[in-house]
Image (tube, rainbow, N blue to C red):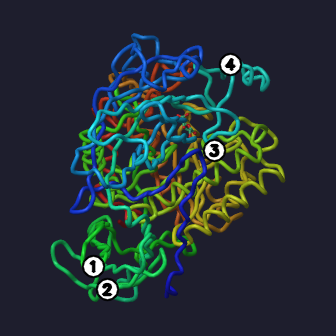
Amino acid sequence: MFSPCSLIIIDTIFTDIGRYILMLYPQTNRCRTVLEQSGFWEMKIDRKDIGIEKGWQKGFKADAFIGVPGSWNEQLSELGLMNYIGKIWYQRPFTIPTILKHKKLLIRFGSVDFYAKVWINGELVGENKGGYLPFEFDITSFVNVDQENILVLCVDNTLSYETIPQGVTEDDFQNFHKQREATYPPTIFDFIAYGGIHRPVKIIALHENHLENISIKTEIQDKIGKINFEADFVNNGSSARVVVTLLDGAQQIAQLPLTLDKSTLCGEFSIENCHFWSPEHPHLYIVKFELFEKDNLVDEYQLETGVREIEVKDIELLLNGKPIFLRGFGKHEDFPVLDKGLCYPLVIKDFQLLKWIGANSFRTSHYPYAEEVLQMADKMGFLVMDECPAVSLNFKYANEKTLANHQSCLTELIRRDRNHPSVICWSIANEPGIWGEEEAISEKAEKYWAVIYKHVKKLDSSRPITLPASAKWGDDDLSYKFSDFISINRYWGWYEIPGDLEKVGVVLKSELQRLFEKYQRPIMVTEFGADTIEGQHSTTPQLFTEEYQILLIEKYFEVIESLPFTVGEHIWNFADFRTAQHHRRVILNKKGVFNRQREPKSAAFIVRKHWLNKKKKAVV
Ligand code: GCB
């Protein structure tokens, strides 16, 4: 049972300059207007970091046009931006309709990777550090209503030891005696640190007094579903009236008239014969908030959410009290030309392919995906492992600031995604210590993970935590200790023991048994796979052929599904994706079951047959 207002609402944070966090996804309704800023913007390359000095914040003579949302890399490779790391300036004029004159105006960026500084009409509005997550600024006092305004951004995709994810330099490869591992551009992970405005930019016009935040927790008691909500308001007037309505489609189920004295209020709905959310029945309810001043409606917001419970119990992962087995993939937000830019048809295509192949889940490897992806996962019934961008953390370089950035990244991730029924766990990092630095299993690292684990539990105790680990540190990897269920990424049959799939089966099985023996927690294999060139064939097992990918995947399925304590199998990867240049990659990481254009390789048909057959383990 929830006690009233027991949920954790994270206060509005003004971390970076001018920052205003209103994490609710923008919506247009009777009280709110969203002005979408996607389209062609102008851009200028700032290789020498002279933009500010030259006054570009007031507007600049552009080098070219750039499509937003989208990365600059492939889109503008002809300007030399394919591997560019540094600053790029963006600008766009905008006008606010006169009808919105007395509204509060916010600007919200879905994500800008990895740093953004924003000016309007030459005045600094704010800055944001960190990628893959939204940020907002109050721009009311910066905008001239009735006149054209100029919005300017300086975007930088440089990473450092302190950012999440961390960045590396060419020298680091030397210092680690890993010159053969060096990539171009230098990266600590196996994908591209694409730069740009990757998700939609929206200007939101709303009443000065408004709803700022909602946190939903759900609970199941037999056939009754409970929706417990806590809502934060900006309320500068005296006491106001709030009506919270629960809807099932168009049908009103319950209504709570409440009085808002302070800035927070909470309440609970009990639904008899509740339709619980699950992959087979992704039923969503709507919780609608209406804020009244006297009799005037000044703000409203509709939140779609589902009633479900997720729990790790003994050797199982339980959804609504029943065991689930996760079938699916690690993915990437990556597609030709767009690179990381949000593309609605691509989101739909990927979900259609996931359904077609019989998957029920995916991991947002290795960073938070667009909010629109999670909205679709809610609607289509996919179980999401939601990952923080702390990929390949190197503990030789991690310091207090890295830890603080990691924590605030998780805070923002949880605040953004906590109301999605599809999100079933927090993946707090991926493969720390993969560089082999001794510090990865040191006391310093242990303390680091203890802080992170506690931080996440404090913000959301309703979802399990996991931390996908590489094979680097064997059974002693600290990740296991800080996982409610264990996640392992394994490349037996590829990087290690290439070619000998019989041996792979034996090694994998005994490792899984050992890990279970030691930690007594359910285990999920979050990555396994083989680079595969479509059209390459062989009658004998041969790396890179379509047949080898099939044989390897089948071997992993056989082992994983034979053990009682395993809770999932995610193939690496859903689709081929671009990665930094290295001799072991022919432009792309080719471990996709689909190619980068989303055409199936032979393995896709085999996986489909297997997963649609719903084997012993395939419970959901
Ligand atoms: C891993 C990483 C993933 C890589 C993959 C590979 O362990 O988690 O980011 O892309 O291996 O293909 O090497």
- Mark nearer the viewer, 2 or 3: 2
Q: CA distance from mark 1 to mark 3?
A: 43 Å
Q: Of label 1 and label 3, which has the lower sequence position? A: 1
Quarter of the image where ligand 1 sits: top right
Q: Which residue is mark 3?
A: 431
User: Can you give x and y, in whole percent of width and height, for residue 394 in the image?
Assistant: 72, 39
Q: Of label 4 and label 1, which has the lower sequence position? A: 4
Q: Which residue is mark 4?
A: 180
For label 1, the SS is strand
Q: CA distance from mark 2 to mark 4?
A: 64 Å
Q: Amino acid under label 4?
A: Arg
Label 1, residues with CA under 10 Å away: few <14, some 14-19, many ≥20: some
Query: Can you say whether 354 is above or below 283 in the image?
Result: above
- Which mark identifies residue 256? 2
Q: Which residue is mark 1?
A: 245
For label 3, the SS is loop
- Mark nearer the viewer, 2 or 4: 2
Q: CA distance from mark 3 to mark 4?
A: 20 Å
Q: Amino acid under label 1?
A: Thr
Q: Residue furthest right?
A: 443
Residue 541 makes an appearance in the image: no
* Whether label 2 touches label 1, CB < 8 Å: yes
